[in-house]
Amino acid sequence: MTAVASEAVRRAVILPFPPRPSAERQRLALALAGLEQALAEQREAVAAWRSALADARAAVSGLQDGLHGQARALDALAGQLGRLGAHSRRLQDWAGTAARC
């Protein structure tokens, strides 16, 4: 070996390999990865649930509007039936009076 090479070897810094993670750290890393996956799935499920709630809210609102429309129509029909009943009674009274004459 030459003097330059031996000097370079003497000055060389030896870098150790990084230590391997312990079994506990590996288990914790796997558990953390599983937890992160579960949380991501949970976020997706909550987003889908909120979307379904919004759809249900819109459907119920539409049903409510339809029921209010039906109630208004039934109120109008009740008024018409009341007037028709009154007219029918007047005709019945007139017919009774005409039959006695």
Image (cartoon, rainbow, N blue to C red):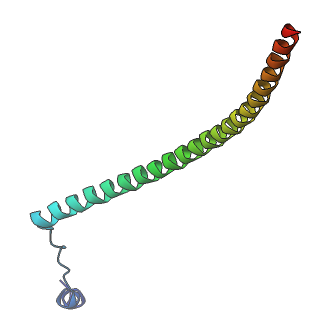
Q: Give the farthest residue toward the front.
A: 101
Q: Residue at x 19, y 73 (%)?
A: 18
Please give the count of numbered marks on the rendered protein: 0
Left or right? Give the position of 3 relative to 88.
left
Against 71, residue 16 (above or below) is below
The quadrant of the image that shows the N terminus is: bottom left
Left or right? Give the position of 86 relative to 18.
right
Q: Residue at x 17, y 77 (%)?
A: 16
Q: Residue at x 15, y 72 (%)?
A: 19
| Between 34 and 21, the one nearer to me in the picture | 34
Against 70, residue 92 (above or below) is above
The quadrant of the image that shows the C terminus is: top right
| Between 14 and 33, the one nearer to me in the picture | 33
Q: Residue at x 85, y 15 (%)?
A: 97
- Residue 21's spot in the image, x, y percent? 15, 68
Query: For residue 38, what is the image quadrant?
Result: bottom left
- Residue 61's spot in the image, x, y percent? 60, 45
